[in-house]
Amino acid sequence: MLISADSSTRLIGRTAELAVLNGAVERLRGGTGTVVWVEGEPGIGKSAVVAAAAQIGREWGCQASVGVADQLAHPPLLGVFLDCLEIGRRSADPRRARIAAFLSDRRATLDLADATRTAAAVEMVVALVDELCAAGPTMLVVDDVQWADDASLDVCRRLVPVAAHLPLLLVMSYRPGAHGSTVRRLRDVTRRRDVVRVPLGPLPPDAVRDLLAALVGVPPGDGLVTLASQAVGNPLFLQELVGALVREDLLDISTRAEVRESRTGVVPRSLAAALDDRLSFVPAGTIELMRASALLGGEFAVTELAALLGRTAIDLCADLHEAVTAGILVEAGPRMRFRHPLLRQALLDGMPAALRAALHLDVARALEAARVEPQRVAQHLLTSGVVGDRWARQWLADVAPVLAAWAPHLAAELLRREVDHDPGDEHERSGLTMNLARVLLATGDHEEAAKRVRQALGAIVDPGDRGHLHWILARALFSGGHNDAAVANLHRALRADDLPDPWRARLLASLAMFQRAGVGDLTAADATARGALRTAAVAGDAFATAYALTGLWAGHSVRRQHRLALKSVEQAIETLGTGVDHVDLMAFVLHGRIFSLQNLSRWTDAEAALRDARDVLRAANRIDDTTSGVTAAVLLFWLGRWDDALAELNAVAQSTSSATYRGLREGGPGWLRHGVAALIAGHRGERGRAAAHLRAGFDRPLVTVADRENIDFLLVARSVAAEQDGNLRAALDHLNDLLERRPGEMTLTHQWLPRFVRLALAADDRSAAEAGVRACLTEAAAEQVPARATAAADRCRGLYHADAAAIRSAVAHYRASGVPVELAGTLEDLAVVLAERDDSAPARAALDEAIDLYDGFGAAWDVRRAEARLRSRGIRRGVRGSRAKRAGHGWDALTPTERKVATLVAAGRSTPEIAQSLFLTRRTAQTHISRILAKLDLRSRVEIAGVVLRQAPGGVLDS
Ligand SMILES: Nc1ncnc2c1ncn2[C@@H]1O[C@H](COP(=O)(O)OP(=O)(O)OP(=O)(O)O)[C@@H](O)[C@H]1O
Ligand SMILES: [Mg+2]
C-alpha cells in the first residue's frame, strides 16, 4: 500500500510551481530559453519538482537531460554534466567521446602547469550545449547544484546569460546552506531579472491531507493529521512518518486512516528515527550490500559495486531488487541511485569509522581496476584517510600529472599527506615532493611550493632530481614576486658540476627570462640565453632550445631589433614542431610572433599569425586561451576594429581561468585587458566605463619589469581622462611614466609619443615637447628597418616644427601598411599644421578623412577634439565629412564582423563553427551574437536569419 516515492509520484500541492515550469517549456518550444532556479530545504520536493519539469519537457518533444550532483569534498570535474549529457569515452556521439577522451587524457603536461585545461573542458561542454540547442529545443536539469564541482558551476554560470538567446531551458535546484564562493557567484548571477525563481515552501494543510491520503490510500483521520503536523509540510518527512507507521502496524485503516491511540508513544518522532526504521526493514545481507553501495557515492554503476565486492552482477541481483522494493535505491538510467541522500548518510553512519576508511581504500583500488577517472579514485583515497599505503603511493606517483591538471587541490591534499606522513626512501620522497611542488604552482600556492622544494633539496642528492627541483623553485619564487631570490637560486643551482645538461639548459633559459623580466638586465639575459642555447643543443632538448630562443626574442624586441626578434620566435616555433607537448610555451611564442610582426608594420601578416596561433591552440583544445584574447584585442585596437576588440576582451573577462604562461608575464594580460578597454571607452567618450576599467586595472601592485610593460594602455587611458577633464598638465604628467623607460622594458613608447608632443605643445611646454621628439627619434634610430617608430618620429617632428612634409611621410607609411588608428591621428595633425599655414583646402581634406576614420571606430571623442582643434584654426569639415553618424540600432548599426556573424547564423552555423571560420574564440563569437540580438532587438537566432534574409535575399548561403 505504501507508494514508492519515485519521480512518477503525482506531485501534490505544487500546481503554481508546475505552471511556471510549463510556461518555460512552452517558451522553449517557441525557440526562447529560460533559466529556472528552484530553491528549498532538504526533502521539500526540489528533486521531485525538477524531475516533473523534465517530464513535461519530454512530453512536449524537447530533449531533456538530468544531472544530479553528489555531496563530496572534491566532486569530480564536470561530474554533473558528464552525467547529464551522457558524456563518456564510449559515447556513440563523437563530440561527447572527444570531451571524455580529453578529460581522461593521461599525458603529462606538467612542465608548465596548465590550469587552462579545465577552462577548455568547460568550454567544450558549453559548446556542446550550444550545438544541442542548434539541433533543437534543449532542456538541462541540474539537481542539487550546490554540490556541483567548480567547473560545472562555471558551465552553469556561463549558460545563464545566454539561455535567453538559445532554445535552452536550464533548470537548477538548490538547497541553501554554507557553500563555497563559486556557488555564491552562481547564485549572484541568477539574481538577474530574467531568471525565474521558484521557491518551494512547506505544503499547505490541504496538500498535506492529500499527500497523506495518497500515501495510505484513504483520507487521514484527525489524529494522523495532528501527528503529521510534526512534518511541517515537508513531503519527505511525511513519507517517512507514514512509512514507519505502516510497517509497525500503527495505523488503523478503514474509511479513514487513523493512528492507533494506545500506541502513539512509540511513533517515531524524528526523521532520523524514521530513516533507521526504513533500513531495519530490509534483510541484513541487503543492508551490507547497501553500505558498500553507499561508499561508492550517491549514484553508482552495478559493475563498480560488483568490482568492489569481487562478485558478479548477477550475484547482486536479488539484493538490489530488495533495495529497490524497500525504496532505498532507484534506477537512474544505467546506474542506481539512493532515493535520498539522507538514506545513504544513515547507512554510512551505521559503519565504524575504521572500517569505513579501510573500505574506501578498497573502493579506490576497485575503481582504478575498472579504469574510471583518476579523480574518483583520488576522492576515495582522500576519504579513506589512509596514508603510506604502497599501492596508493605508486598510483599517486603515476597519475599526479593528470590529477594536477584536472583536480589540483585534491592532488595537493593527497600529496601533502603522503609527504608529511613518512619520508620513505629518498627517491620516493623526492618524487612525491616534486609532484607536490608542481601541483602547488598550479594552485597558486607559491610560498608553500618554495618551502617544500627547499626542504627536499636538503635531502636529495640525485643531480637530475635536484635540477628539476631548482627549476620548480625558481618558478615558484618568480611567480611569488621574489625575482631576486629566483635569480640567486638559479645561479647557485648552476654551480653544481654534476647538473645534467638538459636541466642546465632549462635553468639557464629561465635565468635569462628572469634576468630581463625581473630587473631588466638585458646584457646578462642575452649572454645567459646564448649559453642556454648551446647547452640545449648539446643535450638535444627542444623545450630548452625554444625557451632560450624566446629569451633572445625578448632581448631583440627591447632593442627594437624586430627582424632578429622575428627570426628567433620563428626558430622557436620550428623547434617545438607541431606536437602539443609544450603547448604553453608554444602559445607564448606564437604571441611573440604577432607582437614582432606588428612592430614591423606587417599588419596583414600579424592577422594571419593570430589565425595560426588560434589553429594551434584549437588543436590543443586551448582555443579560449586568455592570452590569445588579449593579444587579439591589442591587434584589433590598432586595426581600428574596436567593437571586435571589445568582444574579445569581453570573452576574456568571462573566462574561468586567468592562466597565462606562468613565470613570464603573470598578470600582464590583466593590465592589458583593462587598459585596452579603458582606452577605447575614453576615445568613444564613454567616461564612466573608462573610469571603471581604470580603477580595476590599477588595482594591483606592479613588481617586475614584465608587469610595467603591460600598463601603457592604462597610463594613456588615464591621460585621456585628464584631457577630457580639461587638465592638460595632468594629461601630460600621466604620460611621463611612459617616457621614463627602465632598462630592459619592452614598452613601445613611440605609439604614444605623438600624443605626448601634442599635449606638451597645447600646454605650451616646448621643452617637454622636445623631450618627446627626442625619445621618439631614439626609438626610430634603433629600428632595423624604418617602420612604426620611424613613422611616429616623423609625426612628432612634424608637429614640433609645424613641418607638413614630415607628417605627410608618416601618413604615407600608415596608409601603406594599413593601420587606420595611427593614420587617423596623423591626418588630424596634418590638418592642423596645414591650417596654421592657411592651406585650408588640403587641411579640410585631411580633416574629413580623419573624421571618416574616427567615425568608423566609433571614436566620438576624437571627432569632437579634431573638430575643435581645427575650428579654432578656422577650418570646418567639408560637406562630405558631415555625413550622418553610424546608427546605434538596426542592421546599419552592425559592424562588419557582426554582419558576417549574422550571415553565418542565418546559414544555420553553430557558434563553434562560426568561431572557427572567423578565427574567433567561441566566447567572442557568442558575444557578437548577443550584440547582434541587442542591436536588432531580437530574441533568437531564427529571428536573426529573418533579418538577414530581408537584407540580402538569396545571398545567405553563398557567403
Ligand atoms: N509535492 C509532492 N507531492 C508528493 N510527493 C512529493 C512532493 N514533493 C516531494 N515529494 C516526495 O518527497 C520526497 C522528498 O522530495 P525530494 O527528494 O524531491 O526533496 P528535495 O527537496 O530534493 O530534497 P534534498 O534537498 O534532500 O535533495 C521524494 O520522495 C518526493 O517524491
Ligand atoms: Mg533533491
Image: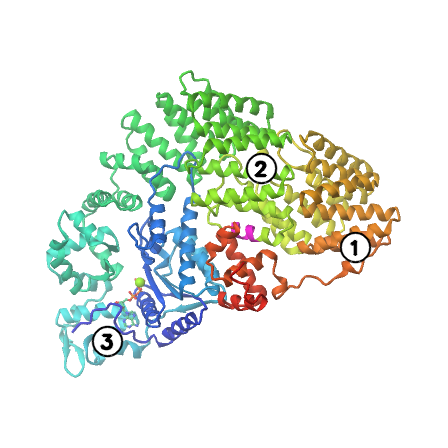
User: Which of the two discs, 1 and 2, sits closer to the camera?
Assistant: 1
Percent across and percent down for residue 593 are 56, 37
Give the residue at mark 3. Answer: 212
N-terminal label among 1 and 2: 2
Tag 3 near tag 1, CB within 8 Å = no
User: Which of the two discs, 3 and 1, sits closer to the camera?
Assistant: 1
Q: Quadrant of residue 430?
A: top left
**Would you place residue 906 above or below residue 796 in this image?**
below
Q: Does the magenta stretch include residue 721?
A: no
Tag 2 near tag 3, CB within 8 Å = no
Instruction: Ligand 1: give its quadrant.
Output: bottom left
Residue at 43% from the left image edge and 48% from the top image edge: 119
Percent across and percent down for residue 61 are 35, 70
Percent across and percent down for residue 346 are 22, 57
Q: Is residue 121 left or right of residue 246?
A: right
Tag 1 near tag 2, CB within 8 Å = no
Q: In which quarter of the image is residue 750?
A: top right
Range drawn in magenta:
647-652
Give the residue at mark 1. Answer: 867
Camera sees residue 131: yes
Q: In this view, does 239 lie to the left or right of 249?
A: right
Mark-to-mark CA distance, 1 and 2: 37 Å
Mark-to-mark CA distance, 3 and 1: 79 Å
Determine the secondary structure under disc 1: helix
Count of marks overlaid on the render = 3
User: Which of the two discs, 2 and 3, sits closer to the camera?
Assistant: 2
Give the residue at mark 2. Answer: 707
